[in-house]
Image: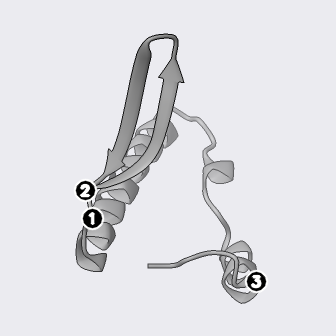
Amino acid sequence: MALIKKIKNGNTEIEIYTSEISKEEQKENLNNLYKTINQIADNQREKGNNVDNWFYSKSELEKMKESGKYNFL
């Protein structure tokens, strides 16, 4: 584990850690997150709610890739 941040509030000190995980574990965790978001979106669509603004369009994703500012797994 790696220490990310220490926060001190009065006499209380909070340490935030992250576990070191492989790229494959990162991909799997991200995939599970996307599945959950898509399930929530599908549920909202079934209720008649528009969720189009929840997701990036293909052109927006291409611009993000081209910018080099984002790390795609």
The amino acid sitting under disc 2 is Met
Give the mark toward the camera: 2 or 3. Answer: 2
Q: Earlier in the sequence, mark 3 or mark 1?
A: 1
Residues at badges 2 and 1 in contact (C-beta under 8 Å)? yes
From the viewer's side, name the closer residue of 15 and 23: 15
Disc 3: which residue: 67
40 relative to 62, above or below:
above
Disc 2: which residue: 1
Where does the N terminus fall, quadrant-wise? bottom left
- Residue 70 located left or right of residue 4: right
Residue 26 is situated, as x and y percent measured from the top left of the image, at 31, 68
Q: Residue at x 52, y 16 (%)?
A: 9
From the viewer's side, name the closer residue of 5 and 27: 5
From the viewer's side, name the closer residue of 22 and 54: 22
The amino acid sitting under disc 1 is Glu
5 relative to 55, above or below:
above
Residue 30, quarter of picture: bottom left
Real-space Cα separation, disc 3 to disc 1, in angstroms: 27 Å
